[in-house]
Image: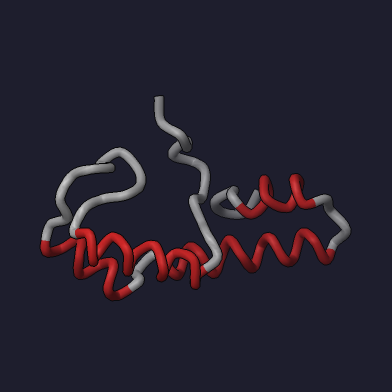
């Protein structure tokens, strides 16, 4: 059973993702998700060095902060920040 649904944004604070990516590149092995424990391909290693996931991270973090500013609880803000699109 997948940890996340396809309609849920999987974001993290950008500097945490960068740290995680650096650790994965050093180990040359997936440390998260469905491919955990499998070796990184050259393409995947390149993605981690470029931090291409940062766009989603910034969008999620922006939505999280916006929800908190609107007076929502942390739990509500997290739920809102993980929605994709305009909902």
Q: Nearer the viewer, residue 20 or 48?
A: 20
Residue 19: name its quadrant.
bottom left
Residue 73, percent from left and from top: 83, 50
Q: Farthest right residue?
A: 71
Residue 61: name its quadrant.
bottom right
Q: Farthest bottom residue?
A: 50
Residue at 49%, 51% in the rendered image:
10
Q: Which of 25 and 74 is in front in this view?
A: 25
Residue 38: name its quadrant.
top left
Residue at 68%, 60% in the rendered image:
64
Total labels drawn: 0
Q: Farthest left residue?
A: 42
Residue at 49%, 72% in the rendered image:
15
Residue at 39%, 62% in the rendered image:
20
Residue 76, percent from left and from top: 76, 46
Residue 17, percent from left and from top: 44, 64
Q: In which quarter of the image is the N terminus?
A: top left
Residue 71, percent from left and from top: 88, 58
When the figure is inspected, residue 22 is found, relative to residue 37, above or below; the finding is below
Q: In the image, 36: left or right of 54? A: left
Q: How is the image coloured?
A: secondary structure
Q: In the image, 48: left or right of 59? A: left
């Amino acid at each position: 059973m997948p940890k996340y649904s396809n309609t849920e944004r999987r974001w993290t604070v950008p500097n945490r993702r960068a740290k995680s990516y650096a650790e994965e590149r050093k180990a040359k092995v997936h440390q998260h998700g469905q491919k955990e424990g499998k070796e990184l391909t050259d393409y995947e290693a390149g993605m981690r060095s470029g931090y291409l996931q940062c766009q989603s991270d910034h969008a999620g973090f922006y939505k999280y902060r916006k929800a908190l500013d609107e007076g929502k609880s942390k739990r509500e803000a997290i739920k809102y920040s993980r929605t994709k699109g305009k909902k």
